[in-house]
Image (cartoon, rainbow, N blue to C red):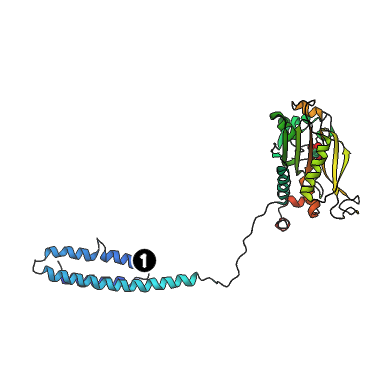
Amino acid sequence: MSSIHEQIDSLRSSFFQDLKNSFSVKDIENLRIKYFGKKGSIQALMQELRHCTPEDRPHLGKLINDLKNDLVSHSDHTFERLLRQETEDRLEKEWIDPTLPGRKSFLGRIHPIHQMMDKVLDVLIGMGFSVRYGPDVDTEHYNFGGLNFASDHPARDMQDTFYLENGWLLRTHTSNVQVHVMEGHAPPIRVVAPGRCFRNEDISARSHVFFHQVEGFYIDRHVSFADLLSTMNDFLSKLLGEKVETRFRPSYFPFVEPGMEVDVRCSACRGSGCRLCKHTGWLEILGAGMIHPNVLKKGNIDPEEYSGFAWGMGIERLVILQSSIPDIRLFTQNDIRFLSQFP
Ligand code: DAH
């Protein structure tokens, strides 16, 4: 067995050999474990002292300690050099230019249809209406029958309505919510129902297979035609501005009697006539009327005791009129250039 002196020499030379081959912080960490760890070479050499005579031990122990201190200081020195070098390399690679202009983050926006919907709902909620959402997929009863459409009414025609299987259909208007609400509630009822509607029409600049409406209705004792007119005036002036001018024209819808259409003074030409209003000076904005007694009866509400009014309006049309949108298809094409014009 070689002497402690020899072992110290060979440990020293193998250490420096290893140190020469250490090129990274990680290498030095491994080297430290190999030589100075609990199961490392220095510790193993210490164990060897057991075989020495008690007189030799202090002297040899000191030699091993000196060796350790020397090797530790060498490895520390190399460690620091490598760490500095690795840090510098990394900083160089991760160099950033603080003078570059910042990248603009893209802010999402609310779709113009929903902006308008929110505006309409805000006004009506402020007037005491509560919001109800009806189903998009419904039955003939809720979409037509309960609303006093005769069984041969042309609106029920396949050409207008998307019929699904087993008597289901895609609602053609939000008026279906009237029937649902009457079924579950007794008057007084004051509801506004926004939502998506579907009609089987050719898609063009002016019409689409789906669009959005807001339906409103009010049922109570002694609700009169005068209430309808004043509510419409109040609602439209809150929505479109205090100065809005309205016009009421008689019209026909199966679920109201009398029925009417409401126009507002053309915002583009202020009434003198232009392309937007087809030279009439007026823009048709909604349909309305006193709820037909048959509709109340079908909803289990006694028309002798209660009366009500209802109205419905298209949201796309409102946005088109207000922002002069040339093509209804723009609303569904998800073109950022279009959508970002509605901040
Ligand atoms: N549901 C009708 C439509 O889709 C709009 C409408 C007209 C709703 C008159 C009403 C109303 O409540 O009274 O064209």
Q: On the rendered structure, is 226 left or right of 189? A: right
| Residue shown at 33% from the left, 65% from the top | 29
Q: Residues within 10 Å of mark 1 (few under 14, many from 20)?
A: few
Residue picked out by circle 1: 26
The percent position of residue 50, horizontal first and vertical second, equals 13, 63
Question: Which quadrant of the frame does ligand 1 lie within?
Answer: top right
Q: On the rendered structure, is 181 left or right of 255? A: left
The percent position of residue 170, horizontal first and vertical second, equals 73, 37
- Mark 1 near ligand 1 (CB under 8 Å)? no
Residue 186 position by quadrant: top right
Please state the total of marks drawn on the protein image. Answer: 1
Q: Is residue 331 or residue 25 the one in the foreground?
A: 331
Q: In this view, does 59 lie above or below 291?
A: below
Q: Is residue 295 or residue 340 the one in the foreground?
A: 295
The percent position of residue 106, horizontal first and vertical second, equals 64, 59
Taking the image as drawn, is residue 201 in sight?
no
Q: Which amino acid does label 1 sit on?
A: Lys
| Residue shown at 26% from the left, 65% from the top | 36
Q: Quadrant of the C terminus?
A: bottom right
Q: On the rendered structure, is 84 left or right of 206? A: left
Q: Is residue 287 or residue 16 the one in the foreground?
A: 287
**Element carrying mark 1:** helix
Q: Is residue 156 above or below residue 118?
A: above
